[in-house]
Amino acid sequence: MATSVIASLPSLVASVPKPKPSSRRLPTSMALASGTEPTAFRISSERKTRTKLTEGGKPSPSPSPSPSPSPPPTLQQEAKVFDETVVEPRGLSDFIEQSRELVRHDGGPPRWITPLDCSAPRHTNLPSLFYLPGIDGVGMGLVRHHQRLGKIFDVWCLHIPVMDRTPFKGLVEYVESTIKSESHCLPNMPVYLVGESLGACIALAVAARNPNIDFVLILANSATCFSKSNIQYLSSFLDVIPEPMHLAIPYFLDFLTVDQVSITQVFSGLFESLNKMLPSLFFLAEILPKESLQWKLQLLKSASSYVDPRLHTVKAQTLLLASGKDQLFPSSDEARRLCKILPKCRVRYFNNSSHNLFLEESFDIVNVMKGSCYYRRSSYKDYISDYLPPTPYEFQKISEQYRWINIAASPVMLSTLENGQIVKGLAGIPSEGPVLLVGYHMLMGFEAGPLVIRFLNEKNIHLRAVGHPFLFKRDSEMLMLDSSAYDGMRTMGVVPVSGTTLYKLLSRKSFVLLYPGGAREALHMKGEEYKLFWPEQAEFVRMASRFGATIVPFGVVGEDDIFEVLIDYNDLKKIPFYDLLDKMLNQKDFRLRANFAEEVGNQGLYMPGLLPKFPGRFYYLFGKPIETKGIKNVSQDRGEAQKIYMHVKSEVENCISYLKEKREHDPFRNLLPRLLYQVSQGFTEEAPTFEL
């Protein structure tokens, strides 16, 4: 229980003005309690806007709204390689210090506040995010994320005073009235509701009551499973436990439910936990005295009872965040249950996290939104304009996932200069977009990760890969052991294949990675390595010509030195009952080019049976860039476009042939010679390759 209310707070909490168009107003439901005005914020009754505090703690008037809306991000801002937002660390000490300031003048009904950490300059096209707190009610559970959230959202935090006794339905109606006003003023933008435990129930209730509002729900450890949790028995102990030790009861219950644990282990673990919690228990008693805790338990019970029969009416896009070591609720089991009920729901599991997920150092809510593609500014997801670039830390973590490929396969990358000379490295790659890299998709797509990472490290170029729809579908996540398996790829900017996405990327002068052979090449049959399965008709040339994009053909070899395909799609189809899995993997939403009569239309998705080999090496060769800017009538002349298309395909085949021949002369093709070289020269030193 204690962990559910230990939160952090920014160094200064205040209300801030909304630099929005005048049509956006603050709803009258944000009126303050009667009596003394809290020092944290106030409402100007004349202007109906929130105001922020100065360093001295005195409220300063909100500036008048700008007569003209803020300009949208420029092309250069949208094309940033990294999100370099500087985030100051926040911790428990900030929460304790500033929460005391927040509740010092507490009283009255619930209200909305906006921390100063979220008050960075905003554009007019930012959606609203309403944070609904857990059982503590302070409203600062997202403190570690305020600075980053403030860059992409207009953040509102619900504060429920310690002694407030508003029933659950009253809280739902209060939140609902605010959201209806926001939705009326900005009808084309989604409304984000981020809630944990009790707040998750409020969010679900509001969404159930307002099916016509475009909600995005992000819910952590929902209290909808209150009747299945240990915390429901807490009230039986409250009368006999002195303050502040009542806050430790959930830990005791948690230890008692562990299977095959001795009494000595139970009390040893309990006292160890209490020893760690004592510095914060006395403060927590200020915001959750026994009387308030008893009320919150009743609130949780009524919340669960109210929401559960209404879950089937929730049609909102929902992301469930479940902690595997939640001390209060069986959150993982509840997430699986809710995912079966809510039609637009996805789940992310955090197996090593506790109930207090939002406050853990390893958790980043913005990163989760990026990976799950849950950030949008309009009624539909635009994978180009809504894309949030990765931070350097996110890029580093994703790079580590491909470290084993770099160690085992030691990729060699070659490029071709304009004069036709082949050189080591990426010097032959154009420095300015739009550029379309078109090449061979190796087995399981093993070549894509190292390719994207090398371009960022060496050229500071962010490749936007065009991917299969399977990477983005809810049904595909439900088939996988790890629902977040593709989050890293989506964080790095992979987009679903379509003419619209390619058009938008090229119009923004992006560097695009395209595989015409798609899944048919990446999931090829036995004996089909290095064979191109491209459509007969040109698919990308005219689009590239329209924007004067440079086409860079490339080939890659090395899959046959890493794995051998033992069981392919044809073998699997002979296995009894495999057709059931095949139907799920190749349902209509996952199929591409299903109406193509040629071989590229046979894109059956499956997991091949692979035999690992003693690792060889990956080799990439980027051919001579093909300019489309100076070629006339390509965008209208299908015949001319077809000639260029066949030329690109021929160049890819030539690159593959060149690499297959030259690798035979690489003394470091096999892993053992490379390891011996790196032992003598250092593991940061790349082993040499064949002579060019």
Image (spheres, rainbow, N blue to C red):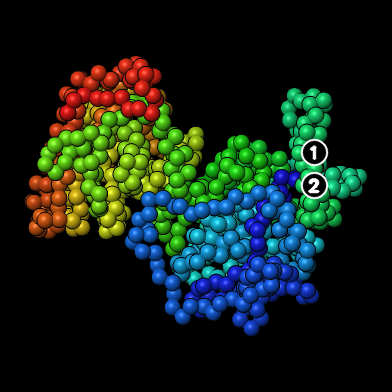
Locate residue 276 relative to residue 116 in the image: left or right: right
Taking the view exactly as shown, the residue that stands out farthest to the right is 240
Q: Report the amino acid beneath label 1.
A: Leu
- The C terminus: image quadrant: top left
Q: Amino acid at mark 2?
A: Leu
| Viewport quadrant of the N terminus | top right
Dot 1 lies on which element? helix
Residue 530 location, x and y as percent? 22, 29
Query: 634 or 666: nearer the eye?
Result: 666
Is there a contact, CB below 8 Å, between mark 2 and mark 1?
yes
Q: In the rendered image, which quarter is residue 58 located in?
A: bottom right
Report the residue at 84% width, 47% height from top: 244
Q: Identify residue for label 2.
A: 281
Residue at image point 85% right, 55% down: 291
Report crowding for label 1: few under 14, some 14 to 19, many 20 or more residues within 10 A (C-alpha).
some
Q: Is residue 16 left or right of residue 187?
A: right
**Residue 377 position in % (x across, y down):** 45, 62
The answer to which image quadrant residue 650 occupies is: top left
- 687 up-or-down from 583: above or below: above
Cα distance between the residues tagged 2 and 1: 9 Å
x then y, percent, for residue 581: 42, 33
Report the residue that reaches farthest toward the front. Answer: 681
Disc ID at residue 274: 1
Of residues 285 and 86, the one drawn nearer to the viewer in this rendering: 86
